[in-house]
Amino acid sequence: MKQIVLSLISEIEKVRKSRVIIYFTGDRKPIGSRIAEDAVLPIYEHLLNLDFTEEKKIVDLYLYSRGGDVSVPWRIACMIREFCDEFNVLIPYKAQSAATLLSLGTDNIIMSKKAELGPIDPTLVKSTIGESVLTQEEISVEDVNSFLSFIKERANINDQSSLAEIVGALAKQIGPLTLGSVNRQHSHIRLVARKLLTSRKAKIDEEKIDSIIETLTEKMYSHGHGIGRKEASDIGLPIVIPDDNLEKLIWQIFVRYEKFLKLPEPIHPEIELSDSEEKVLKEMPLAIIESEKKLHIFNTTIKMRKNRKIPSSPQLNFNINLQLPPNIDPSQIPQQTQKILHELINQVSKKVHQIVHQEIIKQSPVTGLEFRSYGGKWNEEK
């Protein structure tokens, strides 16, 4: 497979006098991908193959992602720092949550006109099993903290017995272990943000670091809030505005990937299954890591099917009675004719099976649609 945006990577490298690695996690609904640990080694392979010709080694990470595992940005930032003198990020559009966290560890954040960062308050996934069905619910760490602040500051409930009762009810609702994870993540995200901000070449004073972390974790009251480049600069982040040529190149890369990953084309199971009970989509590309010499694509398999409630006693009203007339002796039938009759009987048997299957489907109402992905992995394209 030819690389997707090789010519555009070369143009940016000439303009920036840098080496470019692209990490693009697609958000095609409902199967978007996220920043995850499995991308660390592929990115490392790209770093090993960078060919620096300039005296100053500069790595530009082109980044598009809605977020992901908050433990991964520190690993990626530290790894890239080992290969360069300057580490920057190019943001075409969305770099939210864990992608924003990764951007904090760069020397310069180059944002296009459409680019947006986001709050770095993490979410936890609460998993419960009921009636043999696994359900998952996302819980915002800052939502829990905000609730407790509301109880104390707005509702003015401060006596220990009332607080203990409220915390007990909260623990019962989301689970004591999840509540403990909330406290741990609250501290972890601030620690990681601080480590990333202090890893930059240009040092920031402690007061400014505290202000940036507080703003990105607590003062943005919506996890989906988009932080444009002016607001990001006001917060205190090292924002760089690209010139018209670089702006154009950054956006052209996004458009190419948007088309390749079919981001504007959601998969609707109800449409895909309009004329079938089950459908499998193989080798679906979800994410890309690309540089001048390598291309990795994360592919997965998608399986969709209708869930039906089969009646305990389906009504099957048909009768197929096949027999030879009584005046015909089977031994007198020619061999060739016997073969033909045998084949016809097999065909009728298959037809009966299809009829039974169709009748059961007609009498079994659809109770839901199942949609899952499996077998996802990074593949290097040759």
Image (cartoon, rainbow, N blue to C red):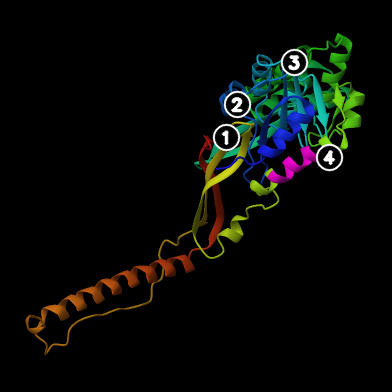
* Marked residue nearer the N-terminal end (3 or 2): 2
Which sits in the foreground, 18 or 367?
18
Q: Which residue is mark 4?
A: 114
Looking at numbered disc 1 in the image, what kind of residue is underneath it?
His
* Marked residue nearer the N-terminal end (4 or 3): 3
Q: Secondary structure at mark 4?
A: loop
The vertical placement of 15 against 133, above or below, is: above
Q: Secondary structure at mark 3?
A: loop
Q: CA distance from mark 1 to mark 3?
A: 27 Å
Which sits in the foreground, 2 or 354?
2
Looking at numbered disc 3 in the image, what kind of residue is underneath it?
Lys
Q: CA distance from mark 3 to mark 2?
A: 18 Å
Q: Are the residues at dot 1 and dot 2 in contact (C-beta closer than 8 Å)?
A: yes
Q: Are the residues at dot 3 and dot 2 in contact (C-beta closer than 8 Å)?
A: no
Q: Which residue is mark 1?
A: 296
Q: Which residue is mark 2?
A: 46
Name the residue at the front extreme: 53
What span is in magenta? 247-256
The vertical placement of 218 against 253, above or below, is: above
